[in-house]
Image (cartoon, rainbow, N blue to C red):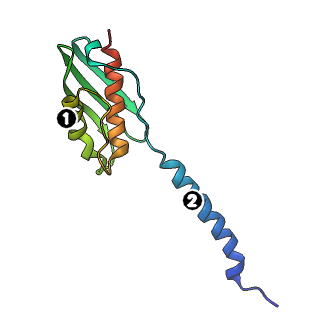
Amino acid sequence: MRIPNVYICMPNFMILYCLTALLVIAACRPTLVYHSEIETHQLKDGVYEGYFKHINSASVEVIISENQITAINILTLEASPIGLKARDSIPARIVKLQTPYVDAVSGATSASNTIINATVDALRKALY
């Protein structure tokens, strides 16, 4: 009795499918926000640059005046078109709340966390 070719190819297809699924899952790991204790009363006035790279990358310029975060300028942001939604809203939230630990933009979590981490990098440089 001859076995049809479909049954011979099926195990190879399943192995390929499983390997592809594992690669996709591994590539989609989230960008974590690295917490450190940063309080605005500890910040020195000045202009500080920060950078972070993971799935996306960002460099920011943070302006501190009178121990307050007064502005955050995105110098570069490499992200998907959806991730670019975070470009304006995350810096505005950080300035408004005076903390880098703000909620991410829905659908742009990785880019949001990349901007947040770049901001934390800059704020660490501004600590007394």
Q: Name the residue under label 1.
A: 92
Would you identify the image quadrant in which residue 66 lies?
top left
In the rendered image, residue 86, in percent from the top left (x then y), is placed at 26, 43
Q: Name the residue under label 2.
A: 20
Quadrant assignment for the C terminus: top left
Depth check: give the residue in front, 48 or 45. Answer: 45
Crowd tier of the residue under label 1, counting other residues whose Cα lies within 10 Å: few below 14, some 14–19, many 20 or above: some
How many numbered marks, from 0 up?
2
Q: Which amino acid does label 2 sit on?
A: Thr
In the rendered image, residue 85, in percent from the top left (x then y), is placed at 25, 47
Q: Badges 2 and 1: C-beta atoms under 8 Å apart?
A: no
114 vs 14, left or right, is left
- Check disc 2 and report its element: helix, strand or loop: helix
N-term-proximal mark, 2 vs 1:
2
Q: Which amino acid does label 1 sit on?
A: Ala
State the residue lying farthest toward the bottom.
1
Up-down: is 38 above or below 85? above
Q: Residue 29 carries which label?
A: none
Quadrant assignment for the N terminus: bottom right
Depth check: give the residue in front, 30 or 97. Answer: 97
96 vs 22, left or right, is left
State the residue lying farthest toward the right.
1
Q: Which of marks 2 and 1 is in front?
A: 1
37 vs 21, left or right, is left
